[in-house]
Image: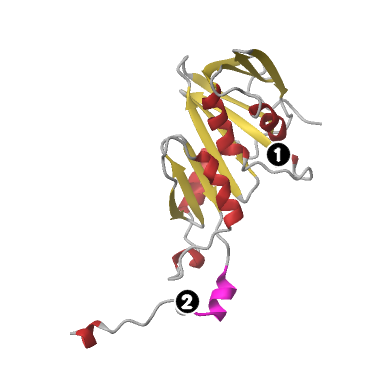
Amino acid sequence: MTTPNATDRRREIALSMTGRELRQLLGAVLQHAGTDPAFPSLTVVTFDAEGAWLYVLATDRYTLGVARHRMTEGASAPFTLTVAAATVQAIVRQIKPCAAVRLTLTGEGLTIDQLDPQVTYRLPASGERPVLPNWRVWFAERLAEKPAAVLTSAHGIALNPAYLARFRSACRDGLPLEMRPAGRHVAITCGEHFLGLIGPMDLSKTRAASPDPLADWLPALPSRKAAA
């Protein structure tokens, strides 16, 4: 039996944005949601409203994406809701970029009103608790971990390109992705609207048995002493 995942089923949070802003907000994190029904807590999108921001988060344990949108209609006390990611994805595809959109979050679920043309989508709360209820603290703890050898070796950082591609949807307005080793992970940011995390590939055994991959590509340079 599942329990309500909103902090207060009687509360309601509403905010307005354009269809383009909604597609950017949700599109930045949907790529990180899990799809395995054996792990239902990873197949949801978490809406986390607090203060002046609405945060949207999804993760499948391999990557994590958090996007945020400023709520211009007033600050909010902490409020959390989870909705099935697959349902959100299906609706996002139908939202018109140029349309005005109204989001309403309650303990019952999420309502998306597209105002022009008028269409209403109602997404019930998933019943799953957020996989990371205190994601800010969790994120800070991951970044504070001692770096693994795989991150500090001369060979650099090895990343799975399939997972790395998920972060492409976080880019907007020509802003680049910024990546930096942090703890045992790699933190990825884009502007002030996106924060992500990706785990590096562990190539410790491979690197122990093979030379620097650049060795066969570049010529050996004369030492500085010889050049002098």
Q: Amino acid at mark 1?
A: Thr
Q: Residue at x 56, y 55 (%)?
A: 199
Residue 201 occupies quadrant: bottom right
Mark 1 in CB contact with mark 2 (< 8 angstroms): no
Query: Which quadrant of the structure image shows residue 210?
Result: bottom right
The percent position of residue 80, horizontal first and vertical second, equals: 61, 27
Extreme residue in the right direction: 1
On whether residue 205 falls in the magenta region, the answer is yes
Instruction: For label 2, count other residues whose C-alpha is less than 10 Å away and answer few (under 14), some (14-19) or many (20+).
Output: few
Give the residue number, with chain letter if any, for mark 2.
212
Instruction: Kindly identify which numbered label has been placed on residue 43.
Output: 1
Report crowding for label 1: few under 14, some 14 to 19, many 20 or more residues within 10 A (C-alpha): many
The stretch in magenta equals: 203-213
* Residue 180 on image: x %, y %: 43, 53
Seen at 56% across and 15% down, the residue is 14
Which quadrant holds the N terminus? top right
Tell me the mark number nearer the camera, choosing from 1 and 2: 2
- Between the C-alphas of marks 1 and 2, the distance is 39 Å
Q: Residue at point 54% right, 45% down? A: 167
Q: Amino acid at mark 2?
A: Asp
10 in the magenta segment? no
SS at badge 1: loop
Residue 108 shows in the view: no
The tag earlier along the polypeptide, 1 or 2, is 1
